[in-house]
Image (spheres, grey):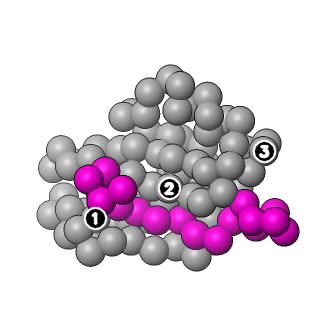
């Protein structure tokens, strides 16, 4: 079971691409495994230091958040939460493969 007790930000609507779901199914992993890590501020082993810093800044200024992970079958997966809108809400979080961006 994956537990997200204290997410650092709102996810908005959560969606995943077909290719990302296929990659996760191939590795026998749930998208929620990566979404919960993303929501807790675990940006993943594949994210560079500059993007990590941008994420930390985004927690304050509401800009886009990006996490990058690798599945058990060695497939890269991204989780992206869109920037806040004018009312301070995030519209969506998407699980996708990097080549789909």
Query: Dot 3 corresponds to which residue?
Result: 61
Q: Is residue 49 above or below residue 67?
A: above
Mark toward the start of the polypeptide (1 vs 3): 1
* Mark carried by residue 20: 1
Label 1 neighbour load within 10 Å: few <14, some 14-19, many 20+: many
Counting from the top left corner in percent of width and height, residue 69 is at 36, 44
- Residue 37 visible in the current orientation: yes
**Rendering quarter of residue 29:** bottom left
Mark positioned earlier in the residue sequence (2 or 3): 3
Question: Any magenta on residue 90?
Answer: yes
Q: Regarding mark 3 in the picture, which secondary structure is present there? A: helix
Give the labeled residue for mark 2: 80
Q: How many marks?
A: 3
Indicate which disc, 2 or 1, sits on the residue closer to the N terminus. 1
- Packing grade of label 3 (10 A; few <14, some 14-19, many >=20) is few
Q: Is residue 78 left or right of residue 27?
A: right
Highlighted range, magenta: 84-101
Whether 82 is drawn above or below 45: the answer is: below
């Amino acid at each position: 079971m994956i537990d997200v007790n204290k997410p650092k930000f709102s996810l908005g609507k959560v969606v995943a691409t077909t290719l990302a779901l296929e990659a996760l199914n191939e590795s026998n992993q749930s998208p929620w495994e990566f979404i919960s890590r993303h929501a807790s501020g675990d940006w993943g082993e594949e994210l560079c230091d500059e993007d990590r810093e941008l994420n930390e800044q985004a927690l304050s200024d509401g800009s886009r958040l990006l996490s990058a992970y690798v599945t058990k079958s060695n497939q890269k997966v991204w989780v992206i939460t869109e920037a806040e809108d004018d009312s301070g809400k995030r519209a969506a979080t998407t699980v996708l493969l990097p080549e789909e961006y």
